[in-house]
Image: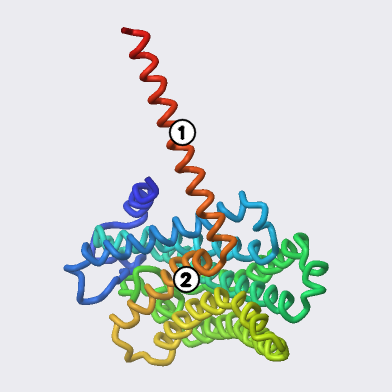
Amino acid sequence: MFFRVCLQVTMLIFNNTTSPSSSSFLLTAFPGLELAHVWISIPVCGLYTIALLGNIIILFVIIIERRLHKPMYYFLSMLSVVDLGLTITTLPTVLGVLWFHAREISIKVCLIQMFFVHSFSFLESSVLVAMAFDRYLAICSPLKYATFLTDMMSFVIGLIICIRQVVFMFPSIMAVKSVSFQGGQELSHPFCFHPDIIKFTYTNPWISSFWGMFLQLYLNGTDLLFILFSYVLILRTVLNIVAPQKQQKALSTCVCHICAVTIFYVPMITLSLAHRLFSSTPRVICSILANMYLLLPPVLNPIIYSLKTKVIRQAIFRLFRFKGSRGYSMRSLRGRWDRRRQFSST
């Protein structure tokens, strides 16, 4: 049902043509492999399904399970919401290119998608910082953790993340609105990415590209530095612990977050460098990096946290066990009712 809605949205925003007008761009997915797009779409759709279902399950479990109403899991729910937003933002364009070869997208729609892609990307970076701060307090200042990081403080941190996003993205929107683009150009990805479309402006693209690079370095760069600094303090505290078992237990609580940070920042930094510094990078490499940047965090984050976090894993098992037992009881009641009707009729 969800994919059917996405397909309808896709057909509304795209035209199934390959000769773009002056007010549109051409999207690209896996250059040179156009004939294999249908087959490539099978694993891509599978990854999108895993990302959507995985993050929805994580979010649903955190909402209904009272044991998970803690700051650590509040931040994880924020991460799932951001991953869902990033997935839904790019799903129509990716399916449009792979299934219908609907490559043409209007410049206005492209700018809207670009805004949401970068907004969710910056939001995810900020949420990862909040999760690093949570781990720092839990390990380095365990006595202050329960008194300082309350439910209200978690809400305030989430609010600060949103306000920070608005403050930095609003000037970017105003700057992009005043820029004129050269329509009919071919982009490098099946979605709109700022370093990709900024090359096709009538004015000097260096200024807009520099602003985008500055914004990414300032927001994501400072976030990454804060995360690294937090783990330096965490590692120093862990090394001062005498008991090896306690050291292992303290570090095990950070494994999921370290994996989430790695799968988010490595593809993002690599893709940005490929666009801005290495202009001779093959288009196929850029396309693969773009899809990794889009799909790796939403797909792997729920899997990692489900496998490595015992409380979440148990809550998911209970959820499916409850649904299974409920379905079995409904079938047994229906069978008893049918047998009674047959007995009464005879």
Q: Position of residue 85 (x, y in %)?
A: 51, 61
- Tell me what residue is drawn at x 48 percent, y 49 percent: 320
Earlier residue among tags 1 and 2: 2
Element marked by disc 1: helix
Element marked by disc 2: helix
Q: Nearer the viewer, residue 51 or 143?
A: 143
Report which residue position mark 1 lands on: 329
Which of the labelled discs sits on residue 263, or is there none? Answer: none
Left/right of residue 176 with respect to residue 106 in the rendered view: right
Report which residue position mark 2 lands on: 297
Q: Amino acid at mark 2?
A: Pro
Q: Position of residue 41 (x, y in %)?
A: 27, 63
- Tell me what residue is drawn at x 55 percent, y 81 percent: 216
Residues under labels 1 and 2: Cα distance? 38 Å
Q: Amino acid at mark 1?
A: Ser
Q: Nearer the viewer, residue 70 or 179?
A: 70
Q: Nearer the viewer, residue 27 or 344?
A: 344
Q: How many marks?
A: 2
Give above or below for 217 relative to 175.
Answer: below
Colour scheme employed for the rendering of this structure: rainbow
